Image (spheres, coloured by chain):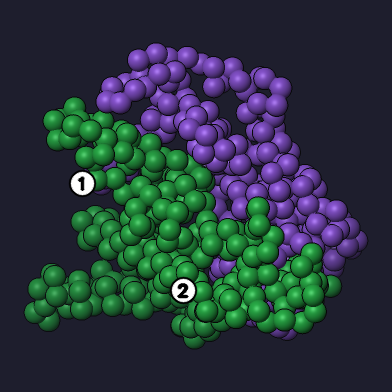
Amino acid sequence: MRRVSNIALWTAFLAPVALLLVWSFAWRWPWPAPLPNRWRASAWTDLAATGGLGAAALRSLGIATTVAVVATGLGFVTSRSVAEARAREALQWLLHLPFALSPVVLGVGLEYSFLRAGLAGNLVGVALAQGILAYAYAVILLSGLWTARVGAFLEGAATLGATPRQAWTLVLLPLARPLLALCFVQTFLISWFDYALVLLIGGGRVATLTTSLYQFVQSGDLRLAAASALLLLLPPLVALVTQAQPRPDALAGEPDP
Amino acid sequence: MIWALVGGPLLLSAAFMLAYSVGLTGLLAHGLSFAAWATVLDDRVTWISLGFSCWVGAASLGISMLGALAVLALRPAPVARSMLTPWSLPIAVPPMVAGLSAVLWLGNAGALARAAYALGWIRRPADFPSPIYSTSGLGIIVTQAALVLPFLIVLFDRLSRVHRLGALDEAARTLGASPSLAWWRVRVPLLLRSAAPTLGIYFLALSGAFEIPLLVGASYPTMLSVRVVQLSGRFDLSTRPQAYALALLYALGVAVSSAVARRLRTSTPRTERI
C-alpha cells in the first residue's frame, strides 16, 4: 500500500514535469494531437541568446543569491536579540505578518516610497523588497538557534579563555552551519519564486524568470513558458536533494514556542 | 534596532498607503479626503472580491484537508521523515509553475482534453469542462488544493504522532466504537483542534494568493490581491488611492486574524503544537 501510494505521488509530481519538458521541445502541437507534430530545441537554444531567457535566469540567480546572503547574514547577527527580547511574542507576530499578508500588499505599499527613493524599476529595489520578506524569514528560522544548549557552549568557550570573536568563529559558526545552510536555501527560494514584488517594484523594467514566464503565457508562447518553468524548478529540486539529510531540529534543541 | 528592522518596512508601507489613500501625498494629492475610502467601501466589486477570496481560500483548504484525512485513513503508516519524499516535492513548485501546469493539464486544449478526445468523449475543445478561467474559481481551488495537500498530510501525520492518536483510536474501539466512529469522533476532532491555528494561517495565505489566480482565474470575479493590483493603476493612476485603501483594509484584516491565530496557538498546550 505504502509503495503504491509513493509511486502514485512521484507520478503525480513527475507527470507535470514531463509535460513541461514535452512543451519546451514542441514546435507545432495542434489540437487534438496527443503529441507534438514537430519538435525543436529552440526554447533551449534561446537560453544563450542575448536578452533571452538566459539573461532572465542569470538575473533571477543574481538577485536570489544576493537576497539569500544578506538576509541570512543579517538574520544570523540579529536573531539573538529577537530570541532574547522581552517582547518576543510581539516581535514574532510582526515577523510572521509579511507572510500572512499577500506579498502584493507589501509590494503595493512599498511601490510609492521606492519610487520616491529611486529604488523602483531597478535590481537593487527588487532585491531590497524581497529582502524584507527574506530577512523576516531568516530571523524566524535562526532565532531557534539560541537555545540554552548553545548558550552553555558559548559560556564554556568563554570560561576556557576564548575571546568573543573566537567563540563566534570556532564554536557558534560550526554549530550553526546546518541551520545557516537551510536558511540560505529557503531565503534564496523566497526570492527565486517571487513574482509580485518583481512586478510591482521592478515596474516591468526588471525581467526575471517568473515575469518572463507570465509574459510568455500571456503572449501564448507555451514553449518558452514551459522552458522558463523547468528552469524555475531546477534550484528548488537541487536544494531538496542536497538538504535531504541534515535536519535543523537536532541543533535547535527546543521547538520554537 | 531590531524593532526598526522588523517593523520599519511594514510601518513605512502602511503609513505611505494611508497618506496616499487620504490624499496627503502622491501624484493626485489635493488635501485630506476620504473619497477613495468611500468609493472602495461603496463598491460592490470590493465585497465580491472579498467574498470570492474567502470562498477560494476556504474551498482550497477544505478540499486539501479532506484529501489529507483520506490519505491518512487509507495509509496509517507514518509519513517518511526525510526531506526528500513525495510529500516534500510541492515545496519545489513555485506558484507560477503550478499555475502553468494547471493550464497545460486542465485547459480546453490541455493534456486531459486531448486524452478525452482520444477516448471519444469530446469532439471539440469547448466540449471539455475545463475549470481554468472558471468564474466559480474552480481552477484556482484545484491548483491550490493540490499544492497544499502534501503539507497537510505531513502536518496531520505529525499531530497524530504527538497526540498518540493511534492509542486513543484503539481505546475507543476497545470501548465498543466502530472504526468509522472512532475516526470521526476521536481522531478528526482532535486533529482539527490542534491544527486550527496553522490552518488559519493557510487560509489567509490561500485567500491572498496572487500568481495562481492571475494565471488560472477569470477576469471577473477576481481575488482581492488581483483587485489591488488592478486598482493600483498600471495604466490609470486615478484609481491608485483606492488600491491603497483596499490594501490597507486587507492588511488590517490579516493583522487582526493572524494575531487571533497566534493567541490561539500560544493558548494551545505546548505538546499539541507542531
Residue at numbered disc 1: A1
Residue at 49% across / 51% down in the picture?
B214
Residue at 61% across / 53% down in the picture?
A196
Q: Is residue B216 above or below residue B260?
A: above
Q: Is residue A253 above or below residue B270?
A: above
Q: Is residue A178 left or right of residue A163?
A: left
| Chain B display color | green
Which of label 1 and label 2 is nearer to you?
2
Who's purple, chain-wise? A
Q: Amino acid at mark 1?
A: Met
Residue at numbered disc 2: B44
Q: Is residue A203 above or below residue B263?
A: above
Residue at 27% across / 73% down in the picture?
B188
Along the line of sight, the residue nearer the viewer: A98 or A189: A98
Place of residue B212 in the rendered image (x, y in percent of width and height, measured from the top left):
47, 51
Q: Chain of mark 1?
A: A
